Amino acid sequence: MSDTSPAAPQFADLGLPAPLLEALNSLGYETPSPIQAEAIPTLLSGKDLLGLAQTGTGKTAAFALPVLAGMDISLRATQALILTPTRELALQVAEAFQRYAQNMRGFSVLALYGGSAFAPQFKALERGAQVVVATPGRLTDHLRRGSLKLQDLRYLVLDEADEMLKMGFADDLEAVFEEVPEQTQKALFSATMPPGVRNVARNHMKEPAEIRLHSGSSSSLETITQKVWEVSNHHKLDAMTRLLEVEPVEAMIVFVRTKTASLELSERLEARGFAAAALNGDLSQQLREQVVDRLKRGLLDIVVATDVAARGLDVERITHVLNYDLPHDSESYVHRIGRTGRAGRQGTAILFATPRERRLLHVLERATGQKIEPQALPTADAVRSGRLNKLAGRLNDAREQSTALHQQLVSDLQELTSLDATELAAALLSILPSAKTLLEPVSDLPAQPPRKDRQFDRDSGLTRYKVQGGRKSGLMPKPLVDVLVKVGGIQRQQIGHIKLFNEHTGVFLPQLDQQALNRLAGAEINGIALQIKAWPLPEGELPPRDHAPRKPRRDFAKGKGKPPRKA
Ligand code: AMP
């Protein structure tokens, strides 16, 4: 093994209590991501924290684990408040808390977001939620009504702070800071650090420790070609099988995030007839060496690895690296793809990115100093011709090895069967096991979300509308929603993502009929006449991730995720 990376820290070194370590182990997390390795000890030490981190870096666990470590589980009061820009993220974060707290009996978490009824939220709050994950608007509503009390609060976390400010929640955030007790420990995460976010940190945090993920070096990646395939999580396995048919793969390392995933995927590949094995931190050193040795000797073609287990792996045969799951940071990415293109050979690194993850690509491009070319998923035709080409290649190779004896056999067979050359070859193909796949039906993988002029988003059935007036004229989402509901007759839960620009505002709504548009045209917000019209999404742009209205998740909305145990 040639690389000399310093030993990665382990979760057990970070000072987390046993129930959390056990939960991480059962979730299959192997090592802390870089942001976790830095943020967890900092938050455990009681310091405020300012973290520059995007989705996918593992930031949720970076704050959820230390918050859980500092909870008094016997106290039913709200001890941690997490603010997120959208209800979807609020639900995701609440779910993450519940996963990490799986061994903390009696723990309760509640997600509070706008667009759903207050009554169940009041009830859930009355029962007591130790962690509240909320969108800022709904949260301040509860604070005003006195339904949420913060006198026992220990932690306040702002997640995706830049997004919250962009959405016009600055005043709500200020109101929250006013309400939290003086000694509350604060953490703020943001993908970017515009002045607004800096100001919040400066005005409300005590000498916060700053964490930013540095990007990796781009040394010796010249022999590697990088490509990205846009694949939804659901179709990754099919896409991978397809990749193996069309790419000239000799040996491949597949990277996934967890030990569990490495085991599961390698088993599924084996079931599909590939020579695959898992390589993860659960294997003993001896077993790991065996896997690497079998890969070197060509007894294995695919190794499904976690980052740690593949560190420093140096096998010349590896022609391809597949990032089945995106890495947590660009440094791991550089490290992963460096497993191919070794000893002066050419290598290919392919990345599966879900539509939502596309925006993370530029970070990886910057870290590697190379463009990551998007590639269309191979069509059924490409798969068929790939199979045919492979067989043609084998036949060409075989011709060199065939002898006069083989030719004699063919003419003997022709005589015996009275078949002509084509008929005989066809009959031979039909009994040749490796030619079977040539006749298997291949279908096109489901197309990715259509990109063209999508005023109408098929996934959610929502249409984007443009409202005149935005940040500059002081338009706020709440009065807009009120008008859409009261005048437009739109149900509150049906209203999707709202985005404020300087001069105008985008909002995702169910398609409005002419009558609704007429009614809205007569409405006013803050004394200004409302102007609203359909606003097609530009080519290539995806709707924001919470464009779709969600059904409130009963378990969280009602605080029933895990019933509190009677003390
Ligand atoms: P986040 O950036 O918080 O949205 O997390 C991205 C994904 O990585 C989530 O699916 C987490 O469950 C997963 N994840 C977070 N930390 C780890 C870790 N240390 N090891 C493996 N997976 C992780």
Image: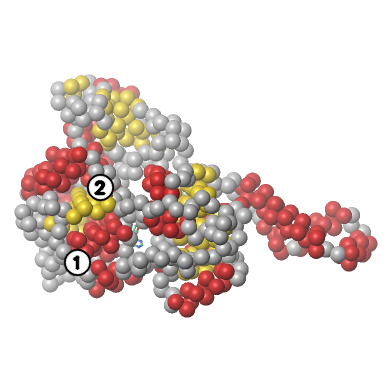
Amino acid type at image mark 2: Ser
- First of labels 1, 2 by sequence position: 1
Please state if 539 lies on the left or on the right of 295 as rendered: left
Q: Which residue is the site of mark 1? A: 69
Decide if residue 46 is on the left or right side of residue 328: left
Residue 6 appears in the picture as rendered: yes
Q: Nearer the viewer, residue 477 or 337?
A: 337
Residue at figure coordinates x 30%, y 39% from the top left: 496
Residue placed most toward the observer, 413 or 487: 413
Q: Residues within 10 Å of mark 1 (few under 14, many from 20)?
A: some
Vertical position of residue 486 compared to residue 259: above or below: above
* Ligand 1 quadrant in view: bottom left
- Determine whether 508 is above or below 265 in the image: above
- The x and y percentages for residue 161 are 22, 45
Q: Which residue is mark 2?
A: 190
Q: Considering the numbered disc 1 on the image, is that residue within a helix, a strand or a loop?
A: helix
Amino acid bearing label 1:
Ala
